[in-house]
Image: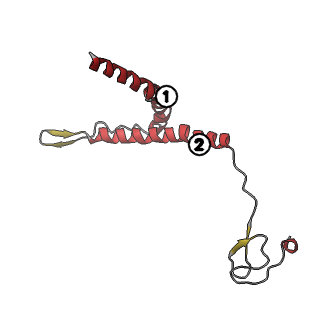
Amino acid sequence: MQGGRTIIKDFKKFLLQTNVVNLAVAVVIGAAVTALVQSVVLNLITPLLGIPGKIDFSAISLHVGKAVFHYGLVINAAIAFLVTALVVFLLFIKPIERAQAFANGRKAPGPVTTKTCPACLSTIPIAATRCSFCTIDLPSAAASD
């Protein structure tokens, strides 16, 4: 009986300490987002593709002996995948990226701490009066402003 209690205790620990709840929430939200994306593709995007002509490759197949290869269904699935991926990218990924960038704010660049030597084009500290690479005398910072 002791072994059974240990298993129950370990299982309880597993449920409480791991991310089982987070995983369950992710699956539920994933299913909801899947339904939303499929609805957008099926009801908004696919009819737009059908305006120039009916796009349906499902009847295309290749017969080799008694075997039938319905490669038209694969073409339809590939088109549906590409359209779905494009819709997800344009309607979800890009707006989320923009929202995250807005929420994080654009960090202002820090103060300028270096300058370029006019003779050798090396990067040197802004307050330098002599280039440490070519040793020429530099105009003072006040004179260059």
Pointer 1 local density, CA inside 10 Å: few below 14, some 14–19, many at least 20: few
Residue at image point 27% right, 20% down: 3
Where's residue 138, x and y in %? Answer: 79, 79
Q: Nearer the viewer, residue 111 or 78?
A: 111
- Tell me if mark 2 has few (under 14), some (14-19) or many (20+) residues whose alpha carbon lies within 10 angstroms of its own: few
Q: Is residue 27 visible?
A: no
Residues 112 and 74: in front is 112
Q: Is residue 36 left or right of residue 112?
A: left
SS type, badge 2: helix
Where's the N terminus, which quadrant?
top left
Counting from the top left corner in percent of width and height, residue 101 is at 64, 44
List x then y, in percent, for residue 130: 77, 79
Disc with the residue nearer the chain's start (2 vs 1): 1
Above or below: residue 33 compared with residue 53: above
Per the image, label 1 sits on a secondary structure element best described as helix
Of circles 2 and 1, the one toward us is: 2
Say which quadrant the C terminus sits in: bottom right
Q: Nearer the viewer, residue 128 or 94?
A: 128
Q: Residue at x 36, y 21 (%)?
A: 9
Label ID, residue 36: 1
**Residue for point 31% across, 36% down:** 58
Q: Does 26 sit above or below residue 111?
A: above
Residue placed at 57% from the left, 42% from the top?
Answer: 94
Q: Amino acid at mark 1?
A: Leu
Q: Is residue 48 left or right of residue 105?
A: left
Residue 23 at x, y percent in the picture? 44, 29
Left or right of 18, for residue 131: right
Q: Which color mode does the image show?
A: secondary structure
Q: Is residue 98 visible?
A: yes
Residue at which label 2 appears: 97
Q: Amino acid at mark 2?
A: Glu
Residue that protrudes farthest toward the top in the picture: 1
